[in-house]
Amino acid sequence: MSIQKKIEDIKQELPPSVVLIAVSKTHPAEAIMEAYNGGQRDFGENRPQELVAKYEALPRDIRWHMIGSLQTNKVKYIAPFVYLIHSVDSEKLLEVINKEGAKNNRIIDVLMEIHIADENTKHGWEPDELSAYMKSEKWLALPYIRIRGVMGMATFTDDREQVHNEFRNLKRLFGKIKQDNPKTGDIFDTISMGMSGDYPIAIEEGSTMVRIGSAIFGAREYKK
């Protein structure tokens, strides 16, 4: 089945309110162009250098999403053009993104990554930690970032009920942050959760953005 057909089939499953991010990390420009020619515009990468190379080589109307763990010293590479950073997992990273946004004279949209999985390998704010940070309103002093919502990754498990609960908790935390912090405004509207293996569950639990890679592009192509 072609990449375009896979995207069409997935989009038929998605409610109109859910944005599809085609996770193109490790896949070549040719594969991305096949998806692009089928109308896909949102693509996700997890390595800044690879993201920059693809940005320079591919059409400029692509919306590039940084979905992987982001080191503070790599923010400068993607700050001039990144559409949305999904993986803000600390106050320090948020401050660096604001600094690089100022250098480029652009406001950078971000999501706060929350640790919802029963796995230590996953990154993110602890829910109480993020709630306290948002209540502190320190983020209001960062004019070059715009907090759009939250992101989370569920535990890699066959226990569907556990995945439901983790996504449900993320949706609940999103709602609590929005209610407790009215200054987030209408722009705080995004819940990025759900990948190839669990996106139907994520949609059931209120996801507004799904990150799908292998179900579109096949297995990752790692360079030796």
Image (tube, rainbow, N blue to C red):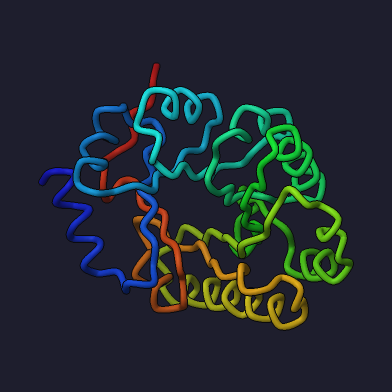
Residue under the image location 52 percent in, 46 percent down: 83
Residue under the image location 60 percent in, 76 percent down: 169
Residue 107 on image: x %, y %: 67, 47
Residue 74 on image: x %, y %: 66, 29
* Rendering quarter of residue 78: top right
Residue 30 located left or right of residue 156: left
Camera-side residue of 73 and 148: 148
Where is 121 relative to 224, above or below?
below
- Tell which residue pokes out farthest to the front in this image: 105
Residue under the image location 64 percent in, 47 percent down: 108
- Tell which residue pokes out farthest to the top in this image: 224
Residue 43 on image: x %, y %: 40, 44
* Rendering quarter of residue 218: top left
Where is 216 relative to 140, above or below?
above
Camera-side residue of 107 and 165: 107
Camera-side residue of 69 and 52: 52
Where is 139 relative to 179, above or below?
above
Which image quadrant: the C terminus? top left
Residue under the image location 86 percent in, 55 percent down: 141
Residue 59 on image: x %, y %: 35, 32
Residue 44 located left or right of residue 67: left
Counting every numbered tag in the picture gives 0
Residue 145 located left or right of residue 138: left
Camera-side residue of 99 and 45: 99
Where is 214 relative to 209, above or below?
above
* Rendering quarter of residue 80: top right
